């Protein structure tokens, strides 16, 4: 399917060094298209180019998923699983966009209490510095009571983020599933669980106290002793440039330094 982008928005994070300069370069090469900051997002565009790191990309993706506007990330940060274009690749990226040499991947998102997440929703007890007993329900049936620092509910996109650090598996973003990973559990037989994206997930605080809930590590709320998590109705459309080392397994090898022999 051919896409023609008439209104491109260049969004930059002013807290990241050289992000503004990179945004202005992009804008000039795209015939002086709109430039605005991540704190003043506009929705009258048909392609969003987010300049920053993965954190900037996540914020932009949550906002524009509501309008089904594709997002392309330019990485000014460290790893860049989501923001995959490097500043030195600007000309190549623009050329591929103009030639329609890209794909749009629709990534699963999570939803709870009218908020969304592209990577993960993290649930902890009322006192984050202490362990909590969290009861996990799948489709209203109790699966397990976790004594842990918390639970991560992650999408396949988020499987390379906090979930990975907590010992979760790496999952292809094409799979329709969610990951449930306990954070520092107090029992050795506790393992991550993968469920279908159609499942209804509910987490209750066994002590009947409040829960601290974080969306993509950026939006934090406190709720009463239960939270219900499910698949968001809308996906996050991510623009993937062809032949640019941005396929999932190529990214894994590059970012995790797989298939590289140790130096002698």
Image (cartoon, helix red, strand yellow):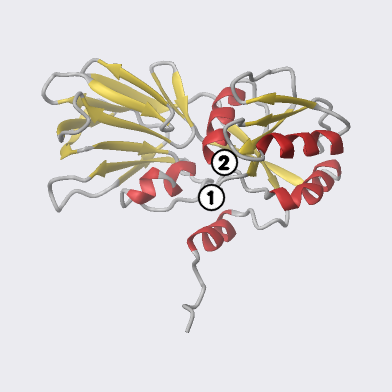
Q: Position of residue 172 (x, y in %)?
A: 50, 50
User: What residue lies at 11% left-to-right and 23% top-to-bottom?
Assistant: 207
Number of numbered discs overlaid on the protein picture:
2
Q: Which mark identifies residue 118? A: none
Q: Residue at x 53, y 33 (%)?
A: 58
Q: Which residue sits furthest bottom?
A: 264
Q: Is residue 32 visible?
A: yes
Mark 2 lies on a secondary structure that is loop
Nearer to us in this view, 139 or 116: 116
Say what secondary structure mark 1 lies in. loop
Residue closer to the observer: 72 or 227: 72
Residue located 21% across and 38% down the image: 149
Q: Which residue is mark 1?
A: 78
Left or right position of 259 against 120: right
- Spatial CA span between label 1 and label 2: 7 Å
Q: Quadrant of residue 52?
A: top right
- Within the image, what quadrant is residue 5 found in? top right
Q: Is residue 60 above or below residue 185?
A: above
Residue 96 lies, in percent from the top left, at 81, 47
Q: Quadrant of the N terminus?
A: top right
Left or right: residue 103 versus residue 251 is: right
**22 to 80, vertically: above or below:** above
In depth, the one of 14 and 149 nearer the eye is 14
Q: Earlier in the sequence, mark 1 or mark 2?
A: 2
Circle 1/circle 2 CB separation < 8 Å: yes
In the rendered image, is residue 1 in sight? no
- Disc 2 residue crowd, few under 14, some 14–19, many 20+, Cα 10 Å: many
Q: Circle 2 is placed at which residue position?
A: 53
Where does the image place residue 85, in percent across and percent down from the top left? 67, 48
């Amino acid at each position: 399917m051919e896409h023609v982008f008439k209104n491109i928005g260049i969004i930059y994070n002013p807290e990241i060094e050289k992000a503004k300069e990179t945004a202005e370069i992009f804008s000039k090469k795209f015939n002086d298209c709109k430039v605005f900051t991540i704190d003043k997002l506009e929705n009258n565009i048909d392609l969003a180019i987010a300049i920053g790191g993965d954190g900037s990309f996540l914020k932009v993706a949550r906002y524009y998923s509501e309008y089904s506007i594709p997002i392309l990330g330019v990485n000014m940060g460290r790893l860049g699983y989501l923001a995959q274009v490097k500043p030195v690749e600007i000309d190549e990226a623009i050329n591929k966009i103009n030639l329609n040499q890209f794909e749009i991947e629709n990534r699963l998102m999570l939803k709870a209490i009218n908020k969304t997440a592209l990577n993960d929703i993290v649930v902890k007890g009322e006192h984050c510095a202490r362990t909590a007993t969290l009861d996990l329900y799948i489709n209203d049936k109790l699966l397990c009571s976790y004594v842990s620092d918390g639970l991560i509910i992650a999408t396949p996109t988020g499987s390379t983020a906090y979930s990975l650090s907590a010992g979760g598996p790496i999952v292809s973003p094409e799979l329709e599933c969610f990951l449930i990973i306990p954070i520092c559990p107090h029992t050795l037989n506790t393992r991550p669980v993968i469920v279908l994206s159609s499942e209804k997930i509910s987490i209750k605080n066994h002590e009947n106290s409040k829960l601290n809930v974080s969306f993509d590590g950026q939006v934090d709320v406190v709720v009463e002793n239960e939270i219900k998590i499910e698949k968001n109705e809308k996906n996050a459309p991510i623009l993937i440039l062809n032949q640019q080392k941005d396929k999932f397994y190529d990214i894994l090898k590059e970012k995790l330094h797989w298939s590289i022999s140790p130096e002698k």
